[in-house]
Amino acid sequence: MSASDVPLWAALPAAFLLVCGGLLTVIGSLGLLRLREFYARIHAPTMGSTLGAGCVLIASMLASSALAERPVIHELLITVLILITSPVTAMLLMRAAMFRSKS
């Protein structure tokens, strides 16, 4: 099986999700570079990595399901773990920064 075997009904949404995921990741990276203080800087990469990785994983799930001709949901576990851990990591970093700035 090759990329030309992916049906058009799955290839178009997967391509759209991949482009959106890439753009979200680039925007998050630019936010990390452009924003000045820590509390503002932490939001852009967290949102970029969470939403960007989510779009890429959903595109992978869609294309894999179309190629296998059955539902492939292995990537769903990865998506759920990223959606849970990335915001929690950001909150812990912000709490550590708040604790450190009070001392």
Image (tube, grey):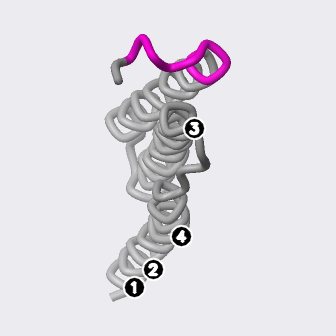
Among the two numbered marks 1 and 4 on one chain, the one whose residue lies closer to the N terminus: 4
Q: Residues within 10 Å of mark 2 (few under 14, many from 20)?
A: few
Q: Secondary structure at mark 4?
A: helix
Task: Name the residue nearer the viewer: 41 or 75.
Answer: 75
Relative horizontal placement of residue 8, taking residue 44 as reference (left or right): right
Residue at the (61%, 49%) spot, across then down? 71
Q: Are marks 2 and 1 in contact (CB under 8 Å)?
A: yes
Q: Which mark is residue 99?
A: 1
Q: Secondary structure at mark 2?
A: helix
Mark 1: amino acid: Phe
Location of residue 39 with respect to 98 vertically, above or below: above
Mark 2: amino acid: Arg
Mark 4: amino acid: Ile
Mark 3: amino acid: Glu
Among the two numbered marks 3 and 1 on one chain, the one whose residue lies closer to the N terminus: 3
Q: Residues within 10 Å of mark 3 (few under 14, many from 20)?
A: few
User: Dot 4 corresponds to which residue?
Assistant: 84
Magenta run includes residue 10? yes
Please tell me whether mark 4 or mark 2 is closer to you in this view: 4
Among the two numbered marks 3 and 4 on one chain, the one whose residue lies closer to the N terminus: 3
Residue at the (48%, 44%) spot, across then down? 57
The N terminus, quarter of image: top left
Q: Position of residue 91 (x, y in %)?
A: 49, 73
Q: Please provide the residue range marked out in magenta.
A: 3-11
Please tell me whether mark 2 or mark 1 is closer to you in this view: 2
